[in-house]
Amino acid sequence: MRHALKAVVAGAGVALLSAGVLASPAEKAETFCKARAIDLENPAYMVVDAVVRGDRLLLPDYTKGLREVDLRTGKDLRSVLPIGTQRGEVTGPQHLACGSGRCVVFGDRYFWVYYDSSFRFLHEYPGHKSTASGQPLVFPDRMVIYGIASSEVSGGGTPYLFIQYDDGGIVPLQEYPASMPVPETVKRIHFQGITTGGLAALPDGGWAFVDPRSYAVFVFDSNDRLTKAWRGTNPRFRAPNWGASPEVHDDSGRQTYSRWQLSQPLVKRPVPLGNDLLGFVVGLPDGPLLQRHELDIYKTTGEPVAVGVPIDGVRAGRLIIADAGAGRLVLVGQQTWEPSAPTTVWQVDVPTVENTQ
């Protein structure tokens, strides 16, 4: 459905496009999530996206291609895709998304490359008008992307949430307005993405998006129509301190920026935990360049079920949520923000709803 509602972010706020009620804080659950850790034998260059199916981890690695890893041992099994610059090949893979019987890879060739579920090449098209910040969602005829699209496809603003059809057509849903000063837009673009915010496919065919700048949650149906909008209630969440955000001009500023970013609460992409439950991992500062993590659980309507449940033993300088399917929470992280840092996968046992209330 190419006629979708669009929201415009103004300043540090976000416009909520439905009459969804803002959730009120819930009591912190007197429990915790157990996490089973497995260290990867070969660290990732930089964790960006991950897909888990059964006991296999698919990990796009900028220097090693698309890796298939055995989650029982942490050992690499194979490199899944051909590395190269020709049609159907990839170099420097960064983003991986799978759904509806196919997978999409985006890397240094700046092409959206499609494969079937066995990674046989299907088709590709140039990605010059869009790029992903977080892991996209793949549907039969389109993707939902949390990233950046060219202002040419909008009314002049910079889209950061949009539908991208298989023919390359783009429909913006939310954007930074053209009136926002460029330095402020750049700060928000730097903050969004790999380790903050993102998307999740829902069991009913719809999907959800969380904006990490405000902990605003948007729930869409299978036709990309907004049905609910609400905010998370974790009392330790606060909006980023944009005034202290350092400028980043090249790699030399990466550590300074990472130190600032890791001092902010970081809301990760949603995880569907059941037909009507969404989980959100929230990273909280825990020493220089490290974060500990909690789990918030809400009904898709915004009603809090459990807020601030500690995830035992998960401390990292970089952490993402793998696409592991509904009802399963798998985290992939690195000890530090630096490339090729030791890499760990945590399979998290989520407490039942009855035990958190």
Image (cartoon, rainbow, N blue to C red):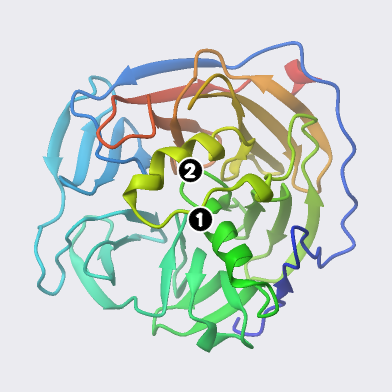
Residue 321 seen in render: no
The residue identified by callout 1 is 190
Marks 1 and 2: CB-CB under 8 Å?
yes
Q: Where residue 28 sits in the image (x, y, percent)?
A: 80, 20
Quarter of the image holding residue 208? Answer: bottom right
**Residue placed most toward the observer, 283 or 224:** 283
The residue identified by callout 2 is 257
Give whichever of discs 1 and 2 has the lower sequence position.
Answer: 1
Mark in front: 1 vs 2:
2
> Mark 2: which secondary structure?
helix
Q: Where residue 225 sits in the image (x, y, percent)?
A: 70, 71
Q: Where residue 133 sits in the image (x, y, percent)?
A: 46, 58
Residue at (60% x, 81% y) in the render: 1
Residue at (70% x, 11% y) in the render: 31
Q: Is residue 300 left or right of residue 289?
A: right
- Mark 1 residue type: His
Q: Residues within 10 Å of mark 1 (few under 14, many from 20)?
A: some
Q: Is residue 345 left or right of residue 339?
A: right
Say which quadrant the C terminus sits in.
top right
267 in relation to 88, above or below: above
Q: Is residue 169 left or right of residue 296?
A: left
11 in relation to 328, above or below: below
Q: Is residue 339 left or right of residue 9?
A: left
- Mark 2 residue type: Tyr
